[in-house]
Image: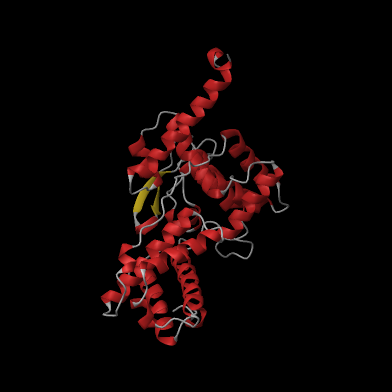
Amino acid sequence: MPDQDQFSATPDLQKQCGVWLDSLAVENRLSRHTVESYGRDLRQFLVFLSDHFARPPALSDIAKIELSDLRAFLAWRRRDGTQSRSLNRTVSGLRNFARFLERHDMPVSPAFSLLSPPRQARSLPRPVAQNDALAMIELALDRTADAWVGQRDAALLCLLYGCGLRISEALALDAQNLPPAITDTSTGTSTGTSTGTLRILGKGNKERQVPLLAVVRQTLDDYMQAAPFSFAPSDPVFRGKRGGRLSARQAQLLVADLRRALNLADTVTPHALRHSFATHLLAAGGDLRTIQELLGHSQLSSTQVYTQVDAQSLKAVYDKVHPRARG
C-alpha cells in the first residue's frame, strides 16, 4: 500500500487514497506508471483542497466538493504549466476515485461525474528520420568501452525501431519470450527473413504478436552471446552491468546521450522510434489495420494519426521540389 502520510488529508481520507491506488494495481491491473501518475494527481488535488479549506481535507469533505472547486483546481494546475493531456488524466483519475468511494458506500459529490476534461489539440507524433535512427544504432555500438554494452544498446534500439515496441514492452521481455532463431547452416548467421514472432503483453494486459525480423534478431543474438552472463528462460533480455533488468530511465538516458552526440532534436526519444516504425511502414504501403495490430492500439483512431504525419511529410517534399510550389 502507498505511504498514506504522503497525502495531505485527515487519516480517514488518507486510508481511502491508499486503498484506491492498491485497487488500481491489483484489481484493475493498471501499470505501475499509470498508478503512480494517478497518485501524484490525487496528492496535488489534496494539496489544493488543503489550501482551499485552510485545513487538511477529511473524507466527509469529498461530498461537499462543488463543480467550481474542481474547475478551479484544473485552472490551478494549468497555471502551473500542466498540459492538456496530463489534465485529462487528472480528470479521469479524480472521477475514478469518486466512483471507488461510491462503490464502497461513501458520500461523494455529484460534481465529480459532471467534470469534463479540457479540450485537447492532438499533437502529431514526431518520428525519427530513417538515417538518424540508423546513425543512433551505429553510434550505440561504438560509444562505450564495454563492447557487450554497446551491442545491448544497439539491440534495444533495433527492437524499438524494427518492431515498434513501447520501451516498457521491450524492457519487460524475458529470454523465454524470444522465438528460436532461423540461421543459415553454412554461415551461422540469420537468413534475412522473419525469425518468428514476439509475444508482447501490452497496455491493459492485451497480448499481440509482432514479427521479429532477422536483422533485429541478429543484433539480439550478437548482444546475448557477448554479454558476460547466461540467459535462463526467466532472465530479462536487457540487463544492466550487474545483471538486473535495465530500467526505462537508463534507456531514456541512452537515447538522450545519442541525441546530443548526433545533434538531433529533443523530440528524439525511445517512444519516437516506435512512431518511426509506424510512420515508415505506412509510407512503404502498410495498411492501417495491420499497423494498428502491430502497435497494439485498441482504437483505429490512435493509428490514423500517422496518416496525418505521412501527408505532412509528402506536402513538405512537394513544397520543396515541385516547380509550381517554388513559384
| Residue 195 position within the rendered picture, expressed as x and y whole percent measured from the top left | 43, 41
Residue at image location 56% in from the left, 46% down from the top: 157
Looking at this view, is 58 or 281 the one in front?
58
Picture quadrant where residue 21 is located: bottom left
Picture quadrant where residue 64 is located: bottom left
Note whether 58 is above or below 83 in the view shown: below
| Residue 94 position within the rendered picture, expressed as x and y whole percent measured from the top left | 39, 67
Q: Horizontal placement of 80 versus 207: left or right?
A: right
Note whether 130 is above or below 54 in the view shown: above
Q: Which residue is farthest front?
A: 68
Looking at this view, is 38 or 183 the one in front?
38
Picture quadrant where residue 182 is located: top left
Quadrant location of the N terminus?
Answer: bottom left
> Count the marks: how many?
0
Residue 173 visible to the viewer: no
Q: Horizontal placement of 99 versus 129: left or right?
A: left
Residue at image location 63% in from the left, 65% down from the top: 242
Q: Which residue is farthest right?
A: 145
| Residue 120 position within the rendered picture, expressed as x and y whole percent measured from the top left | 43, 49
Quadrant location of the C terminus?
Answer: top right
Residue at image location 50% in from the left, 81% down from the top: 54
